Amino acid sequence: MANGERAAHFASLDDRREDQFRQVWSNELNDVFADVAKYYDRANYVASLGLWGWFRKNFIEMINVKPDQQVLDVCAGTSAIGIALLKKQPGLNVTAIDRSEAMLEVGQQNARKLDLHIESLVHDVHQLPFPDNHFDVVTLQFASRHLRIYDVTREIMRVLKPDGYFYHSDMLRPANKIVSTLYYSYLRACLNFTALIFRSNTAAVNCRKYFIDALQMFYSADEFDQLLYEIGFVDVKHKTLFGGMLGFHKAKKIITQENKPKEN
Ligand SMILES: C[S@@+](CC[C@H](N)C(=O)[O-])C[C@H]1O[C@@H](n2cnc3c(N)ncnc32)[C@H](O)[C@@H]1O
């Protein structure tokens, strides 16, 4: 595929996903996370059979951070990533952005308990309200299925400094059909179980099907590599767990004529 065709291909995948999920993305998801906020971390531990902390450890281990760096956590939710990064490197400046006030508020409470500071901002991430070339590191975990991910990743590229890194962690679409069929059945059972024991609200109960449909229409690890390359990232690397059900990506922004810092 030529360059222009690849860009059109990724934009059309976003269009298809948005056409399919417009109602959930624009109306229901916020109600879901307003309800889920208070039990989000516990529900994830239950649904992952206790492996949630290990998933995060894998992700945090691959993120290189240095004192005084500017870090942005996109769709930060309860700021689990920001908190883990501050524990790893207390000299960071961490900003968390998410559309859900309730999720960010739980994140603020969690950070305060540990005496950690995170700037948080309630905002839709399809437009990041930050200048170009501003952050050394940008992270995005467990939210890409709810987004026009090609557009958001281009925004991430814009706000990253040259030589900065983007780190992505998410449930992905396994390339193998048998693995994916088993995976979706397991997820269906988990969503029913957690909705029951945490007494989810109507919005969360109604979105159980959406969570699986959104995954089925999402990227495999290799396809996500292609999206990152298309946007202009280099050194794209990924690692997967459980036959591609979970993927961790790392990608670097390079200096170009357009984003080169001006010399004094
Ligand atoms: C499953 S949670 C993930 C939270 C966190 N990153 C983590 O790893 O635990 C998904 C988050 O994405 C946020 N989100 C979904 N669509 C968004 C949008 N368009 N703009 C900003 N945040 C959004 C939700 O509010 C929610 O907090």
Image (cartoon, rainbow, N blue to C red):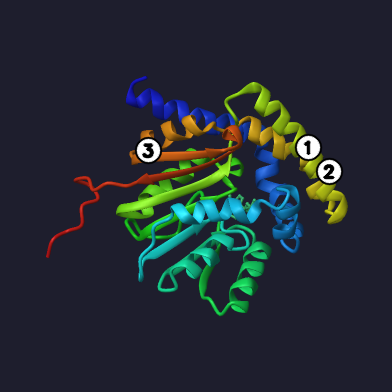
Question: Amino acid under label 3?
Answer: Ile
Describe residue 31's horizontal placement relative to residue 263 as left or right.
right
Residue matched to label 1: 188
Q: Looking at the image, is 219 positioned above or below residue 198?
A: above
Q: Looking at the image, is 93 positioned above or below residue 80?
A: below
Q: The residue tagged with tag 2: helix, strand or loop?
A: helix
Residue matched to label 2: 192
**Is 148 in front, or is 84?**
84
The residue mark sitting in front, 3 or 2, is 2
Q: Residue at x 65, y 39 (%)?
A: 22
Quick one: label 3 or label 2, which is nearer the N terminus? 2
In the picture as drawn, the residue positioned furthest to the top comes out as 1
Q: Quadrant of the C terminus?
A: bottom left
Q: The residue tagged with tag 3: helix, strand or loop?
A: helix
What x and y, as percent, mark residue 224? 48, 34
What x and y, as percent, mark residue 54? 60, 53
Do the residues under discs 1 and 2 have CB atoms within 8 angstroms?
Answer: yes
**Residue 187 appears in which quarter of the rendering?**
top right
Tell me, for residue 180, which label it has, or none. none
**Is 145 in front, or is 192?**
192
Question: Amino acid under label 1?
Answer: Arg
Question: Amino acid under label 2?
Answer: Asn
The residue mark sitting in front, 1 or 3, is 1
**Mark 3, residues whose alpha carbon is within 10 Å: few (<14), some, or many (≥20)?**
some
Quick one: label 1 or label 3, which is nearer the N terminus? 1
Residue matched to label 3: 231
Q: Residue at x 71, y 53 (%)?
A: 50
Q: Looking at the image, is 73 positioned above or below residue 222?
A: below
**Mark 1, residues whose alpha carbon is within 10 Å: few (<14), some, or many (≥20)?**
some
Q: The residue tagged with tag 1: helix, strand or loop?
A: helix
- The CA distance from mark 1 to mark 3 is 33 Å
